[in-house]
Image (tube, coloured by chain):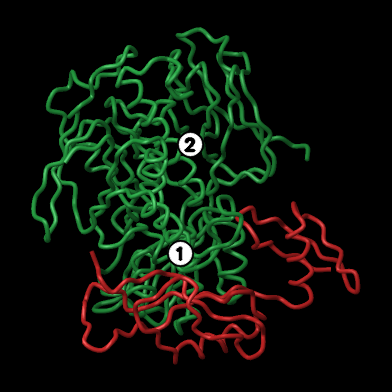
Amino acid sequence: MAEYVCVVCPRGCALTVGDGPDYAVTGNACPRGAAYGRSEATDPKRTMTATCRAVLPEGVSDPRLPRRVPVRTTVPIPRARVGELVAALLRVEVTLPTRVGDVVIADWEGTGASVIVTRDIALTVE
Amino acid sequence: MTYDALIVGAGAAGMAAALSLAGRGHSCAIVDREGFMGGILPQCIHSGFGLHLFGEELTGPEFAARLETEVALAGIPTFLNTTVLSIERPDPARGSDDPRGSDTRGAFRALLSSSIDGVRRVECRSVVLAMGSRERNRGNIRIAGDRPAGIFTAGLAQRLINVDGYLPGKRAVIIGSGDIGLIMARRLSLSGAKVEAVVEIARYPSGLARNIAQCLDDFGIPLYLSHATLRIVGKDRVTGVEVAPLVNGAPNVDRAFTIPCDTVLLSVGLIPENELSSRMGVPLNPATNGASVDSRLMTAVPGVFACGNALHIHDLVDRVVGEATRAGSFCADWLERSRGKTAGERGSGGQVLGEISVRAGKNVRYTVPSSLDRARAQTLSTRSMVPMDHGNFCLRDGESVVFEKKLSWVRPGEMIFAEIPEGALGALRTDAALEASIDPEETA
């Protein structure tokens, strides 16, 4: 038996998850909470967000442009591997301009999670 | 240049209000002093936005991009890198709140300034205030001690890390348990810094439970509840924070201890930004630090509406968009009525039977709006002053209950919404005065 706070939505339900093999979830207000409770008890996962270094194309310079490009995983990854992905993203550079959805890393380490850009950054700052 | 509505602020609130107005066929323009749209959203790179509005979990920049795309499609002009210096009413008689409708042409004159286009004058019939908020800082909560380098508000640290690419320090203590502070505890941890502690003076965290779970517990960061910050220590750079547990409401100095660190982040609340509103003569509500508004989200200055964090601090951006959409729609009603359209052409919110004041009573910090319309269905936003597992939100006229709603998991950090149906207030006298209260309930 284990207790968790559901992180699926801002409501933050207090979940109680029974032992395996059933992992019966109580305290959830919706089916997504039940799925989260089971996942948390068996294989905790997190959607990871981070930033990558922004690189300007040759000949462009504009101090007003952001120096980091925000990214996220398309699906949650195992919580234990978050640190590993953070380390991998430290070495990644993204060239501006960017569009939401641009793929930075496709199918990271065979997890099925890709890392995508989450911000439209245009080169012309109004 | 002349517009039906001038919208101050290009964050979630400003964009949503503009879309609502444009959807009703009114011309509007959005002004923002930053060089990008979205307000605070582009630096909120974490996910958790948009569940209510879009039915999926988005990051801040993605949420902003969705609204920005709609604003561009609607052809709404935006003035970026532009500050609103002032908004004046040259002839206060114009655009007065006359139910028969009056001519609002040129009711307001705004002075805009930008380094690229210089100073410009814009005329408009109405104004939507959507300037958002500022962070409370050390001075606001009076933390004693030294004045070394290394002290940041949480949102500033967020901007430094997520947009500008600087790490503000290596060992941090976060004072206050607001959501931005919790989010930044996780971000600092993921960015290679160590977060030594989060220190909260109240006996419950002010941020959402899920942020305690995924931002502190996931990283083993201790949360000290009921602990006061006595002073910040350090000569050139912060070297530590001295804290003490609260006993009977006062810090127990004998049990004080120092947490070594090189950086302090403050996450101690937000204050609606209303310098422009005050200069326009818009009266503020001391409980929210935002404008006092009636049921149409209109301030005491006719034709001036307010929404989002400039009106009162919200917990979720989805709620900001909801409120701003209503503000835009009320503004459209106002414009349509003032142009002398017939009753049949008016929006549903155009008729005002008479407003009844609402006072914050037991356990209620404030209500927005400060008055309700007797005729319409409407939304009342409020916050509880104390946490309770189950409660009952109640609107009373003297002894008689005119509306009530059962609540569960009531927390001061989370907003409460009461959807008051049409007709609920119809039987009240015009001089009635309502009181809002939240009473704890023992039963589950």
Few, some or many C-alpha atoms within 10 Å of disc 2 (few <14, some 14-19, many ≥20)?
A: some
The N terminus of chain A sits in image quarter: bottom right
Q: Amino acid at mark 1?
A: Gly
Q: Which residue is mark 2?
A: B365
Res B23 visible: yes
Q: Is residue B65 above or below residue B196?
A: above
**Residue at 35% across, 57% down:** B39
**Residue at 44% across, 92% down:** A91
Q: Which residue is mark 1?
A: B181
Front position in the image: A14 or A81 = A81
Front position in the image: B333 or A18 = B333
Q: Looking at the picture, how far across and down is residue A82, in whole percent?
A: 59, 83
Q: Is residue B2 above or below residue B253?
A: above
Which of the 4 quarters of the picture holds residue A106?
Answer: bottom right
Say what secondary structure mark 2 lies in: strand
Asked if badges 1 and 2 are on one and the same chain, I answer: yes
Image side of residue A63 versus residue B15, left or right? left
Q: Colour of chain A?
A: red
Q: Looking at the picture, how far across and down is residue B261, in whole percent?
A: 40, 78
Q: Name the chain under label 1.
A: B
Few, some or many C-alpha atoms within 10 Å of disc 1 (few <14, some 14-19, many ≥20)?
A: many
**Residue at 48% across, 15% down:** B433
Res B195 visible: no
Q: Which chain is green?
A: B
Front position in the image: B78 or B144 = B78
Residues tagged 1 and 2 counted as in contact (Cβ below 8 A): no
The C terminus of chain A sits in image quarter: bottom left
Q: CA distance from mark 1 to mark 2?
A: 22 Å
Q: Name the chain under label 2.
A: B
